[in-house]
Amino acid sequence: MLQRFYIETFGCQMNEHDSEKVAGLLAHRGMVAVNSPEEADLFLLNTCSVREKAAQKMYSRLGEIKKQKGTNPNFLIGVLGCVAQQEGEALISKAPFVDLVVGTHMVHALPDLLEEIEQERGGRRRVATDFMESTAPVEIPQVIRQNSFRANITIMEGCNKHCSFCIVPYTRGRERNRPAKAVMDEARRVVDQGFVEILLLGQTVNSYKDPHNRRFKFADLLSEVAAIPGLRRLRFTSPHPREFDDDSISVIGEMETICNQIHLPVQSGSNPILKRMRRQYTRERYLELVDKFRNCGRSIALSTDIIVGFIGEKEADFQETLSLVEEVQFESMFSFKYSPRPETEAQNFEGDLPEEEKTRRIMALQRLQKGIQLRLHRQRYLGRCRNVLVEGTARDGVRRYGRTTTNKIVNFPGNDQPGTFTEVLITDVGPNSMVGQKLEEIEQNQRKQAYGTRI
Ligand code: SF4
């Protein structure tokens, strides 16, 4: 009988939350989580295939874990997530020591699969990668959350967009939305349990529609969750620019619980490249959306994702991306070099750029963004007071760190408990993080007046 499990997670916040659901399922069948693979009977690797390196990383990690089978013949290895979905049986051929492959739609079946393995019904290995026909994901009875103050809540899974570079629609399937009632029940429950921040999750989170009432949209859900008494902060990820309607922008403008940070993944500033990427918006439409957020009534920090070196990206296209970045002045950015992914449309495009050219472009983009971030941090944060949600001990092992509502990391001296809020005066800024001093330690009332209020 399997008793102890260890889960390792690669990839995005959605994968991290899937691991929290898996931990809940395993705890439900009486298993306990342990702190290292060496203590476990069951090792699960929850994988990501969005970038080429993530899949390579998975195989090398499995190679390391395999050695444990030599000392414990009953030790089981399972692979979950996007690579499991993508590879299926082929994963067992490449890594024959793997006992279990569970795709993105079959996580709920994990307890039954383990039961079958324990009973040795039909041999030891199991591969479950079917896509479910249902319009809503299967509800998981219990979630074991990694974080004691921020609760991740899935509202939808999958994607109907088919951007030409993206593997997600092939590994996660088409959109499936959770009923609004299930989301609201979970949201109220976590707030009752003391969570102060909720992160709503979905591959295209803002395309949400209640499967029982298609007129109940993302804006409605956002507004209802944001109004839960006791909830202090609400975030969501990852939205698609095209899916933001005026209703959702109004809700964001009106409800202060919703954090002052919106992620708007642009991917490129060039119209021909956006078209090749099948992003379903133009540079002009994207900039209109940026304007709507700028005029929504609150100060919103924008962040973005950019892919450089997409197939066919000429120097002029890249310059368009740089000019869009200058124009928008994002407060943060995730940038990636394009790498072809299996099954995607772009895999068949001709003319992948040389690696050196992609590297040159990404370095130029990151240099530009670093300068923008530093300038914005000096203008918007330095010498001002910000409300910070304490997350834990800083990297130096001495100070605390936390986040502003705009998702900026602030390090400061103190003993505050994770999950508490404190006002911090920002005394120094870098491009990626900031340093501050707790306001209550520097004559709280006078300083608040002198340095303004939070945003
Ligand atoms: S919207 Fe595009 S990039 Fe985002 S998950 Fe769907 S296909 Fe991928």
Image (spheres, helix red, strand yellow):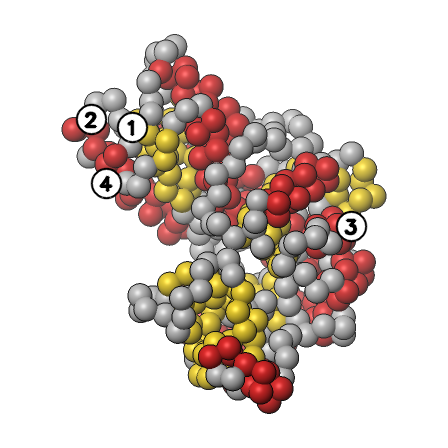
Camera-near label (4 vs 3) is: 3
| Of pointers 2 and 4, the one earlier in the residue sequence | 4
Amino acid under disc 1:
Asp
- Residue drawn at (80%, 44%), measured in percent from left and top? 216
Circle 2 packing at 10 Å, graded few (<14), some (14-19), many (20+), is few
As helix, strand or loop, the secondary structure at mark 4 comes to: helix
Q: CA distance from mark 4 to mark 3?
A: 47 Å
Give the residue pinned by disc 4: 64
Query: Picture quarter containing residue 432?
Result: bottom left
Pinpoint residue 97: horizontal percent, then vertical percent: 27, 28
Are the residues tagged 2 and 1 within 8 Å (C-beta)? yes
Q: Which sits earlier in the primary sequence, circle 2 or circle 1?
A: 1
Residue 91, placed above or below residue 364: above
Residue tagged 3 = 220
Residue 35: percent from left, percent from top? 30, 41
Q: Residues within 10 Å of mark 1 (few under 14, many from 20)?
A: many
Q: For the residue carrying disc 4, how many other residues have a C-alpha within 10 Å: few (<14), some (14-19), or many (20+)?
A: few
Query: Is residue 203 visible in this depiction of the protein?
Result: no
Q: Earlier in the sequence, mark 3 or mark 2?
A: 2
Of 291 and 252, the residue lying toward us: 252
Q: Earlier in the sequence, mark 3 or mark 1?
A: 1
List the residue tagged with mark 2: 72
